Amino acid sequence: MTTSSSDIVLTNITQIFRGASVRSVGGEFKAVDNVSFTLSADPPGIVSLVGQSGSGKSTIARIILGLQKPTEGSVTYRGKDIYKLSAREYDAYRQEIQPVFQDPYGIFNPFYRVDRVFWTVIKKFKLARNRQQALAKIEESLHAVDLRPEDVLNRYPHQLSGGQRQRVMLARVHLLQPKFIIADEPISMLDAAVRVLFLNILIDFQQKYGMTTLFITHDLSTAYYVGGKILVMSKGEIVERGDIDDVLVHPTHPYTQMLLSSIPIPDPDARWQDKTSLVDIEGAMPIVALPDMEVPR
């Protein structure tokens, strides 16, 4: 597979956590094990990274965002290792690769109005020449995520629903017009109706604005809804990859097959026959008490 300079390329990424907080043999846990893949900006697409909690998905997200330097391997963008960028280059990287996190409640400072999310970005990245132009951009971004400015601006975070708060973060992404979105379990705390709206916005961002999304989830049904490519993770490794239709219709790895068989049939009269558990496939997984890792539940 050929890559362009604007792609994000992960090469042989390994992340090992060590220390007393790691309850495994020798105080060492390999959260990510020799992972390589590419996020392409041209053409833009959606890549779903799927696996159970503790499989290493969020660790990969943090590595791509520059929040967690890998033990081994590299992440390159525009031909440069992101952990060797100059301050100016890293600012440009931050503008072009934007996160959307899981918790719509914890991402806001409760002491400030929601407006601050937008004005901080505009000031940091010099997105407008004056206040009038900045306000027009903010309103345009809110409309892009199906929010009315009068319902959001000048309000505090606690005055908005979880779905509204997540869409505010998507509006912030729209304001920056990045090339990539790293969405780490962004809908797991939203109700079903809002989930569909959120997913439709991600698809819209891809089709209208050319943004590529790494969509991290444990839910195969939502991955199937957004389409595109899929990477299936188990115990820190990518065990299967490809077009989502091909992988879900003809899974080859036992872990992927198990994930598919664990989806209940939407029929109250049909009993769920498959008793296979994640532990049967993966074995007992070590628990790592670190704030930047997913902990199996």
Image (cartoon, grey):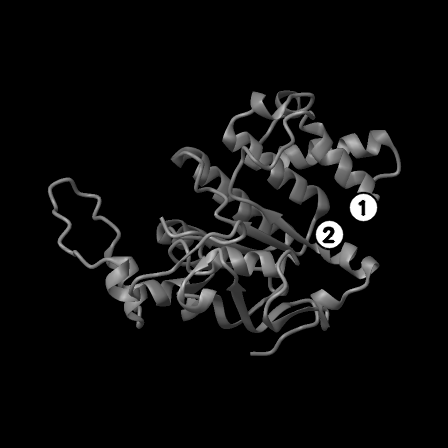
- Work out which residue is located at the far bottom of the displayed protein and give it: 1
Instruction: Check disc 2 and report its element: helix, strand or loop.
Output: helix
Q: Nearer the viewer, residue 56 or 173?
A: 56
Image position of 117 (left or right of 51)? right
Q: How crowded is mark 1: few (under 14 residues within 10 Å), some or many (20 or more)?
A: few
Which residue position is annotated with label 2?
95
Q: Position of residue 35 (x, y in %)?
A: 51, 71
Image position of 25 (left or right of 76)? left
Q: Are marks 2 and 1 in contact (CB under 8 Å)?
A: yes
Q: How crowded is mark 2: few (under 14 residues within 10 Å), some or many (20 or more)?
A: some
Instruction: Check disc 1 and report its element: helix, strand or loop.
Output: helix
Q: Where is residue 113 in the image (x, y as percent from the top left)?
A: 69, 25
Which residue position is annotated with label 1?
125
- The amino acid marked with disc number 1 is Phe
- The amino acid marked with disc number 2 is Gln
Q: Which of 175 and 257 is in front in this view?
A: 257
Identify the disc placed on residue 35.
Answer: none
Q: Position of residue 32 (x, y in %)?
A: 49, 67
Task: Measure the alpha-carbon separation of dots 2 and 1.
Answer: 8 Å
Image position of 122 (left or right of 233)? right
Which image quadrant for residue 104? top right
Which image quadrant for residue 37? bottom right
Q: Which of 14 and 193 is in front in this view?
A: 14
Which residue is found at the position 56% from the left and 57% from the top? Answer: 61
Which residue is found at the position 54% from the left and 52% from the top? Answer: 292
Q: Is residue 241 visible?
A: no
Q: Position of residue 23 (x, y in %)?
A: 42, 59
Which image quadrant for residue 111? top right
Q: Can residue 267 be seen in this view?
A: yes
Considering only vertical position in the picture, is 109 above or below 259? above
Which residue is found at the position 31% from the left and 68% from the top? Answer: 251
